[in-house]
Structure formats: structure tokens, C-alpha cells
Amino acid sequence: MNYLIDTHAHLYLENFKEDIDSVVANAKQAGVKACLLPHIDSTSTQDLFELCNANPGFCFPMMGLHPTSVKKNYLQELQHVENLLSIHPEIIAIGEVGIDLYWDKTFQKEQEIVFIRQINLAKQYKLPLVIHMRDSMPVTLRLLEENWSKELTGVFHCFSGNTDDAKKVTGLGFKLGIGGVATFSKSNLPEIIQNVELSDLVLETDCPFLAPVPFRGKRNEPAFLPFIAEKIAQLKNIPIEEVARQTTETAKNTFRLGTVF
């Protein structure tokens, strides 16, 4: 099988502190060539960069303010993001960013301000966007469309819309991040996967969250990525090798990793 790229892995979180070396080794043994690490807020910065420095060529850093971290101090957190972007040319994406209306709507207006600012950072630094849109697809799409320009690209991480939403997302030049939810019995992702092009999909774990069947409920990790690729292969009725080849190629193009591999 061709190698895989995990386009969304929170490997620097406390869940992996005790055995991160084994987790990385298991991922490589499973055919995972790279893990792309989304930033959350200033509390995650040090651990994220330390892990990337410890695993060069395997862990790649993103930079962004997660919508659930948008609070009263959002301007300070945004400045932190901008400062790091200015001094770390190795950052591969603005992420994860977006709108989350699942946990708390208190700071929705501030989330929108922060999202727009980070869309503009993606334009400024010519980097892809990794977008979080939990319970917020309409407003997320509206804000992206209102601030869109043709050079923008990226991924709708943990895509959770319907087929019409998927068509809008891909029409804007973005890819769909497909993870463990695709293997869940009540998921609508199988229908969506069957109705979009394979070239519009990238693989992700969102580890340590959302482990695929048969590991559902356990700590997720990049070594489980082949189970997601296999599910897509079944839905598309194609070999898993083709899923690996195409999703890897799409990830390399979207995140401009062609010079790395």
C-alpha cells in the first residue's frame, strides 16, 4: 500500500505524553508518512513545536486560534498567532480555525471576527486553511464565501455537512477531511463519500478523538488511519492502494508538501 498522511493529529496533547515515541513508531509501521499538527491556542504552542522539532519530516506544525478558545482575550491570542507566523516559516497551514456553536455560543461574534482575520492571514502568508465547523456549517460557509479569493484552499476538518454542503466546499477549492466518523453506523459520511470525487478527500484521525471502528471509544492514533482508508475503498469499490495514492497526493498538493517527500 502507498503511504498515508494524517492531515489532522493532536499528538502533542497530554493523552500521548507517556508513549509518544511508540505512537510515532506504530504510525510509521502502519504506513503513515507524516502527521500534520493543528494548533489550539497559546497553551498548546510549546508542546506542538517541541514535538515537531523532535520528529522532523514526520510532524508538521499549523498555527491558528481554535474557535472554542476564543474568549475575552481573543485579541491577545490572535497576536500570539500572528507573531509565530512571522518567525516560523516551517508552519504549513492556518489551523485549526473556524466556528464552533456546539459547546458555547457566548462568543459567536468574536469567533466570526477571529475566523475572518485568520482567513486573511491565510491569504497574507499564502497558506491553506484548516477549518473547524461544528454545528456551524451555514455561518462558516457564509463567512468563507464573503471573504473568499481564488488563491484560498484548505480542508474542512472532520466534515459534518450534507452532500450539498460538500459540493459547496469543493466548489470553493477546499477538501473534505474524512476521519473515524466515516466508520460509524449512524454517520451520513458514507453517502457523501460516494457522491464526491476521491480527489476531494484527505484522511485524518483528529487523534486522540474519534477513533474508527473497531477502536471506537478508545484513544485514537495515526496508526488507525488505514481503517479509514479501507472504509473509503469499500464505499468507492476501489483498491485501498488507490485511496492511499490519491489522498496522499491531494494532501501533498493542498499543504504544499511536494518538496518534502
Image (cartoon, grey):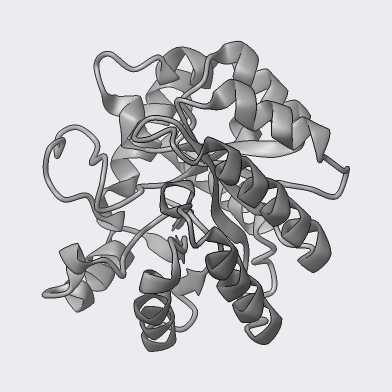
Where is residue 40 drawn, in percent x and y?
43, 60
Left-right relation of 208 to 134: left
Vertical arrangement, residue 186 with respect to residue 146, above or below = above
Taking the spot 62% from the left edge, 31% from the top edge, the residue there is 140
Residue 125 horizontal/vertical position (percent): 78, 67
Kindly give the residue lying farthest to the right in the view shown.
150
Residue 3 falls left or right of residue 25: right
Name which residue lies at 31% across and 70% down: 12
Residue at 62% x, 18% y is 165
Q: Quadrant of residue 258?
A: bottom right
Q: Position of residue 229 (x, y in %)?
A: 39, 38
Q: Dividing the picture into quarters, in which one does residue 50 lie?
A: bottom left
Where, by quadrant of the figure, is residue 6 drawn? Answer: bottom left
Please say if 171 is above or below 129. Answer: above
Q: Report the label total.
A: 0
- Foreground residue, 102 or 175? 102
Q: Position of residue 113 (x, y in %)?
A: 66, 46
In terms of depth relative to the viewer, which is nearer, 75 or 176? 75
Task: Give the answer, above or below, for where 206 lies relative to 11.
Answer: above
Quarter of the picture holding the C terminus: bottom right
Name the residue furthest front: 72
46 shown above or below 182: below
- Give the residue drawn at x 25%, y 72%: 25
Residue 188 visible, this angle = yes
Does any portion of residue 261 appear in the rendered image? no
